Image (tube, helix red, strand yellow):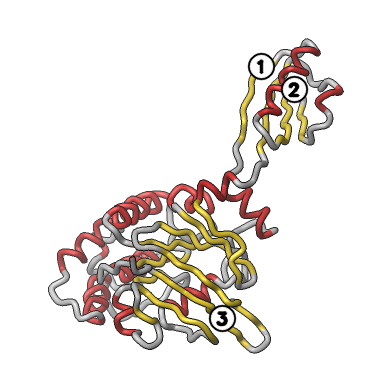
Amino acid sequence: MTPAIEVQQLSKRYGKLIALDNLDLTVQPGEFFALLGPNGAGKTTLISILAGLTRASQGTASIMGYDVLTEYSEARKRLGVVPQELVYDPFFTVREMLVIQSGYFGIKRNDAWIDEILQHLDLSDRAHTNVRALSGGMKRRLLIAQALVHKPPVIILDEPTAGVDVDLRQSLWQFIRQLNLEGHTVVLTTHYLEEAEALCNRVAVLKQGRIVALDSMHSLVRSTRDYTLELRLSTDILPPGLTIWPGKHNGCLHSLKIKEYTEIETILAILRQSGIQVLDMQLLQPDLETVFMKITGSDAAGDS
């Protein structure tokens, strides 16, 4: 099967700065893939190379088997990119922008698909509004519409919900999920890590131009055994046997860090022996943010 995206030994240097360092990455058709990393990790540089906006220092990159450099036209037809920056032409209406974008790809009579995109992105009532009169959130919706107007099999969303209201975020992801179910490959970068965890099947984490983690979302999240056992007890004093577990304590509420499920029974046995009653108990599982911080030493997915 021809990969949707394939990069081999890809490097990009800006003088002494290495933005990408011998990167190898393959994304298969139909994947919903997360590309994450802290500031300066190289995510946007990689996307710019795939879109043909930046030339790699070495290595190759292809979209659906077409080299982004030597077969640029064919590669670009198969790729839709939603950039971080708000880029628009202030002289046209929303619909005119989408008609013009269709023309770039040689698509005529695209009205039905344009209407569908406008509806899903809640832009129908702004179709004849001049772009310069749109709010920032509306302009971002238009960027998404432009990326989808030629029905590309590969879609890259670079922070697509930045500055977007909650309602649009929900409708957008419903639309993108449907496109993914219909076979479109989706690559997402976002600093909303809960979105990536909920949507994506596989994830690559970049740091300083290199991939430092690559796995299924489930396996990556479960790779960090940092569970938190929250206990509400009948007393605010822990028995001496439980002080070996690090944690936080606030009155009768105690949060203990554990590594294995088997530790729960040991903790409960110590409490029973001490005559302490458990009023409430909850086990908090690690999430993508926990794993991300551990891998990168960062507190947000950030830009690059």
The reply, left or right, for residue 165 in relation to residue 145 is right
Q: Pointer 3: what residue?
A: 11
The reply, left or right, for residue 129 in relation to residue 193 is left
Residue type at the position of mark 1: Leu
Check whether the beta carbons of the residues at disc 1 and disc 2 lie within 8 A of each other. yes
Residue 94: x and y, percent? 27, 70
Q: Which mark is residue 252?
A: 2
Q: Which mark is residue 279?
A: 1
Residue type at the position of mark 3: Ser
Taking depth in this image into account, of 230 and 206 the one nearest to the observer is 206
Q: Please say whether residue 172 is visible from this viewpoint.
A: yes
Taking depth in this image into account, of 223 and 81 the one nearest to the observer is 223
Q: Residue furthest front?
A: 1
Q: Of label 1 and label 2, which has the lower sequence position?
A: 2
Which label sits in the foreground, 3 or 2? 3
- Give the CA separation, mark 1 to mark 2: 9 Å
Position of 70 relative to 216 (above/below): below
Q: Residue furthest right?
A: 240
Q: Which mark is residue 41?
A: none
Residue type at the position of mark 2: Cys
Dot 3: within a 10 Å radius of its alpha carbon, few (fewer than 14), some, or many (20 or more) residues?
many
Which label sits in the foreground, 1 or 2? 1
Which residue is painted at 68% across and 86% down in the image? 16
| Res 141 quadrant in image | bottom left
Dot 1: within a 10 Å radius of its alpha carbon, few (fewer than 14), some, or many (20 or more) residues?
few
| Res 107 quadrant in image | bottom left
Under circle 3, the secondary element is: strand
